[in-house]
Amino acid sequence: MRIVKPFTVPVSLYCILSLLVLGCTQKKNTMAIEKSTNLVHPEDWPNIRPLPLDPAIEAQIDDLLPKLTLEQKVGQVIQADNASVTPEEVKQYRLGAVLSGGNSAPGPLPYADTKAWLELADKYYNASIDDEGVEVAIPCIWGIDAVHGHANLSGAIVFPHNIGLGAMNNPDLIEQIAAVTAHELTVSGHDWTFAPTLAVPQDVRWGRSYEGFSEDPKIVHSYADRVVYGLQGRFGEEDFMGAGRVISSAKHFLADGATEKGVDQGDARISEEDLYKIHAAGYYTAIPAGVQTVMASFSSWQGRKLHGDKDLLTDVLKGQLGFNGFVVGDWNGHGQVTGCTNTDCAQSLNAGLDMFMAPDSWKGLYESTLKHVKDGTIPMTRLDDAVRRILRVKIASGIFTKGAPSTRKNAGDESLLGLPENRAIARQAVRESMVLLKNNSNVLPLDASKTILVVGDGAESISKASGGWTLSWQGVGHTNEEFPNGESILDGIQEAVQKAGGKVVFSADGAIAMEADVVVAIYGEDPYAEFQGDRENLDFVPNGFDVNTLAEFQSKGIPIVSVFLSGRPLWTNPEINVSDAFIAAWLPGSEGGGISDLLFQRDPSFDFTGRLSFSWPSSAVVSKDAEPLFKLGYGLTYKNDTTVDQLTENSGLENSAIAFTGEFFSKGIPVAPWGLWLSSGDLNKQIASYPTSVGGLIVSKTDHKAQEDALRIKWTKSDHDEMRINSASQIDLSRQANGAMELTFSAKSFEAGEALVQIGMCSENASCDQFLEVSIAANDWDEYRISLSCFADLGVDMTQISSALIITAGEGVDIGLSHIRLESDIDAKPGCDGK
């Protein structure tokens, strides 16, 4: 490959420093919300000199473009998900790219092994280069979200999520991590990863906060180029896009971390100055580093969807910032642009999007885009520019000369996954990412020769320690057997203690009476990703482990060390109070042994070097004016004599402000703000005690997993009376409906055979007469799941849900109903019959 050396100093050092510290003095200080036109001013942004174009590549593009049919050009600007497109369709429509969403993999699981990935990669590639019926065929590229390692590949290393990597503040190590990720991607035949995430999250209620390195733009700025170097190699050097390298994608342009209340895909109501001083910081180093693609954000700025914002995508990104790669969309993000649908959006391409990410909508989008080019709605010059940019990236990546994925270096060699030297890099990242928040009486480091009681559901679960985007989109429901090259935190502790001659006792729930020298409690958030990870407040609600059990050990004078697993800082004052030492371990991934390295200081050189890259909240209520409990940059070492005094346990939340958590009915009672209501004709009655009835409907308590934790509902008349779970305030579940969430409950029929019930959801003042039929099996309790999208398809307004569940049935039906909630779709296959 011919390499052209880049010009030096592509960005003004003065401007970068002044932007990130003081702000360029010549910049305007006018809030965009005060501008009547909301216009962008590209001249106010830093001017980045574009990287030089390779004349040989441009000549090759000049030769290729005239040979492509219009249909081929349209195909090049569309990317489809592997769950929705066949290799034959890639050839027929000449698609430019394929992606694998978080739950999309060859085979029945959301992840796959090397052989399965590589076989499908070959099929797509070979289909794309089949030149039957065309003068020249263009190879497709295959992208995937390898955001903390290649976590949809069995056996790959799962690194700490970015929030932890930001806390280590080590650009050299971040480059090594990216290089290992690229290496493992080439084993499975992938060409492209949708990383790095360059968000600068300002409200950690956002469910993707852990994908950001820091709330501090300086840290993001210092990391962005190094991730690009690790993935792609250095622009201008022989290694650039060579063997073992992949295409990178800086995302999400722009201000995805600035939305109001941290709402995913929401609106950033901030000034243009905040855009270029804070949220664009990472792009100022990623673009000069040669990042090949930039992904547009789902979100909006000042009400303008980024997927349709020409000022930002074209005038700023491609103009002022000098980006000459291609802009790719996010998952059907174009469909959110005003006037667009998932299958029709000329506006996005005209705004500067070069490749649509149209996972399941690609065919309709192809047809409408072809029509728009033919009728002039999309100018041919704009289409040609998009295709030129795509070809530029493809040629630079070597895709035209590399051959089929299975023939490339590293391809198919599973022995290259989880190499000892690469696992050592991940383990170092775990050590350096941990932040010691409290170490009263210098309880750490621990003596590994003592008796260590380990409690908590995070100790033996690699899945919980890894978080979302691990083996599946939301990362839930995975066992340790699915991490063949992984080590749990418990495994690491046991190995360290056994080596020192000590003793480890493990009790996941802590329900054990014994004498121990110390208790190590490992607990925290369950895995989540976008949509489902958004929160209304920052109160840590214990799940999987009752933290109250620690108080009993504390009362006996046993020191307690808490290892807290989370994708964001949370209000944890009660947990900190009950702990002598408290460690923010974030989401460390598959190298749990790194935790034990610092618990026991397994090497004299080891110490806590992690520092908070996000401030730690003093209240569960988010307020920009609140003083943090622990400030940005805080972190203790073994030698610090800092004592954290008893903290207030007033969360700041009123009962009425408790957030909707996705639970409607749990442990035998409705979960606030929801209540149980019975309806018969014009008669409506809220349930206050049991048993109770209205019309021919009788509701009492029954047992499922515990005494009276479930409802028994019996219809004695044929009037189809209803039981409802209602809220006085409306809940917006539209994002959950779009985000593959399911209404989930347990049920059984008390009759000899199956019971047929009708299930609905409803918005306030609607007719509420649309239902889905579900058959409830007899004898045993089973779990039933209905995709929220099914209710949306019935015409239910999911933005104003006031009845989260309506259930009705015919005379004689007698069922049990328990634990009604929302959960993620574990198989990514919407079902409307409860099965």
Image: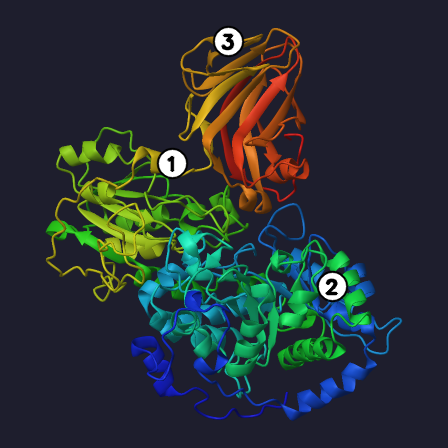
- Residue in front for this viewpoint, 20 or 105: 20
- Specify which label sits upstream in the sequence, 2 or 3: 2
Q: Quadrant of residue 508?
A: top left
Q: Farthest right residue? A: 133
| Residue 422 relative to residue 612: left or right | right
- Say how the picture is coloured: rainbow
Position of 425 relative to 712 (above/below): below
Which residue corresponds to mark 2?
A: 124
Residues under labels 2 and 3: Cα distance? 60 Å
Please state, as top left, top right, bottom left or bottom right, where the C terminus lies in the image.
top right
Position of 364 relative to 774 (above/below): below
Residues under labels 2 and 1: Cα distance? 42 Å
User: Could you tell me the amino acid type at mark 3?
Assistant: Ser
Which residue corresponds to mark 3?
A: 693
- Secondary structure category for the residue under label 1: loop
- Specify which label sits upstream in the sequence, 2 or 1: 2
- Residue in front for this viewpoint, 646 or 593: 646
- Confirm or deny contact between disc 2 and disc 1 (CB under 8 A): no
User: Could you tell me the amino acid type at mark 2?
Assistant: Tyr
Please say whether residue 353 is visible from this viewpoint.
no
| Mark 2 surroundings: few (<14), some (14-19) or many (≥20) residues within 10 A | many
- Specify which label sits upstream in the sequence, 3 or 1: 1
- Confirm or deny contact between disc 2 and disc 3 (CB under 8 A): no
The numbered mark at residue 544 is 1
Q: Quadrant of residue 193?
A: bottom right
- Secondary structure category for the residue under label 2: helix
User: Horizontal and vertical percent for residue 166?
Assistant: 35, 65
